[in-house]
Image: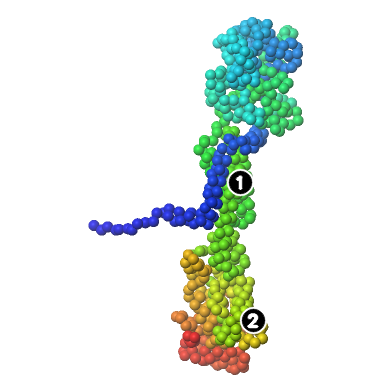
Amino acid sequence: MNATATGPQRPALTPMLANMSKLVRQIGRWQTAFSLIALALAVIVARDSWHLLLFLDAEHAMFDARVVALAPLVHQDPRIVIVPYTDDTLIATGKRSPLDRATLAKALTRLDAMGAKAIGIDILIDQPQADDPALIAAFHRMHTPTFLAYASAATASDKILYRQQQFLDQFQRAIAGPHVHAASILLQTDQDNVLRRWTPPVPGAPPRLPNAMLPSAREYADYHGSLVYRRAADRDEPIFSALPIDTFADDSIFAVPGASDLLAKQIRGRYVLIGGNIEDIDLFQTPLSRVTAKGESHSMWGMDLFAVMLAQALDGPPLRPLPDAALWVVAVAVVAAGGFTACMNRRALISGAVLLGQLLGLGGIPFLLAYRGTETYGLPAFGWLVGWFLAFLVVSVAARALSSEQRRFAQGALGKYLPRDIAARIMRDPDSLQLSGEKREIYTLFSDLEGFTALSHAIEPEMVATLLNRYLDMLSDVVLSHGGTIDKFVGDAVVAFWGAPISRPDDGKRAVEAAIAMYQAGEKFRNSAPDGVPPIGRTRVGLHWGEAIVGNFGGEGRIQYTALGDAMNTAARLESANKQTGTSVLVSGPVVERSGLDIFRPLGRVMLSGRATALAIYEPVPDMPEPERSSFAELVKRASDGEAASVTEVTALAERSADDKALHKLAFRLINQKGKNYYVLDSK
């Protein structure tokens, strides 16, 4: 039996915890703690803004906006009729307690005979009148389910005193019968005195008037959600028809033949609500009050509100709120979305589209939910916006702190060695800078100032420092202006590369142009040396393309962004080979193939020290005419392949060009290839 032992495995959470710990250090412990607390508060606001006084008015306003925007336009409701008494009624009868009992008794008797489906009376009989016996008798004769208003001093002290309640209780007992019952008429507004929802049932009290009149709507028995308001499609036609109570109490009207039948058609099979339309009494503000049009009432009487509730119960099931768990999930998602948006580092168009989409979604979802029949009273629509903005702000601040830390790190790691555009891209997207080594294809460049070591022994140290700083500054400007990355300075040598940390399509062209410009800068430098300084040598440059490992290397206390590998070594060998090839700038074949430039003349194939294969080398000659370069390239190719006549032709060409050291050196190498198609350069 074989057993395979495995060592302890690192838990999957370990890297995550390490990254989180690093993130906390970069942002700062206090900043992180503040951010987490603020995000927790953002979640609370996004969930419970209806319970926070600071945001309640805004939630009310947004709820009212949904009611106004989605209130259906309807024609007159044929199921409900209102029988109001007005100021004119009270003037005509001379009684305000609150209505003449004889008038009410006559109206009830006649409405009962006309076949009303149910009658609700929004009138508190809380004081005695001489005609009370007639009214009690009328109640006893009722066959239609009839419900008389009830309120108690404990729940409606603004409407009724205790002694009034005593009379009301006595009167309710006197009229009680199989078809006559009490019903609660309590209406409660929000803190801003706007009626937006059904008043919760009062324990021990009679059922609410709409529930009493429509007992079949059991789902509304305990409902205390929002009212579903409707708006009249025709301003000249109210949603609920109204017949003044005076009509049903006027004996002269019923003495007219056919009048009773005409009125009965408007009552039969309908729910009848009797109540007062008295100026400045029992009036309520509603969400529709904010946007009433000309000709529409700014307020609604309590009787009209009971009609709205009754119509809502007749229309179908009540509105259902989102589950509490779902609201918490949405709150967390909203805050996460705000934080995610703050972390986005994309193009302005994309970021703007995402931002606009989220804000439209946050503002539009409550409307969509309300449109689909979801209860949105208590839905934290404004809280979502506040939570989103709070998360966006908090994460933006934290991201700015993190970005500053990353910027300091990038600047410390690369310092002044990066060109401005690459540095700017890294600051915008720090993830584009790999902090560990990675294999990249880059253009590597080495330069060297000929004879500077001997020169440094011939002049004062202060002058050496001055000259060296000026020289390196000139060459650094060339590298950076051509988009290169400075790897390091080694004495008077400059090491640079293109293609990292960020690569560009024209890196090859930039590198070649930089190599030429560095040589030219070296010539300018040595021709402008101060008096008394011995002659300064030329600047030699080697340029190669290949793979290298690029990244930050070093320890915790000191790191350096650099490139390692054969490509770097080859570029160094090419720089040194200039001494044997009679050139100042040498580039390899891979560079020529990828630069997109046609400014090179070939100098054959050589075997560099430390390499196992030969390498084609070229000299950039931008001033050489293109036809001449093309014919010369063909000639060198044949000569490199061992064609004797071509070798002789190159030798003759070199003899005619006495000042062209590179050509003379090429002829020498071609003659001495010893049967190979390349020449082995000395190791030094």
Residue in the picture at 67% in, 17% down: 275
Q: Which circle marks residue 525 in the picture?
A: 2
Instruction: Please tell me whether mark 2 sits on a helix, a strand or a loop.
Output: helix
Q: Callout 2, which amino acid? A: Phe
Residue 632, image quadrant: bottom right
Residue in the picture at 62% in, 13% down: 163
Q: Nearer the viewer, residue 389 or 155?
A: 155
Q: Nearer the viewer, residue 114 or 393?
A: 393
Q: Nearer the N terminus, badge 1 or badge 2?
A: 1
In the image, residue 153 sits, relative to residue 619, either above or below, namely above
Q: Which circle marks residue 389 in the picture?
A: 1
Any part of residue 117 in sight: no
Q: Callout 1, which amino acid? A: Phe
Q: CA distance from mark 1 to mark 2?
A: 57 Å
* Rendered location of residue 424, percent (x, y): 61, 63
Residue in the picture at 54% in, 44% down: 40
* Rendered location of residue 540, percent (x, y): 57, 82
Quadrant in which the N terminus appears: bottom left
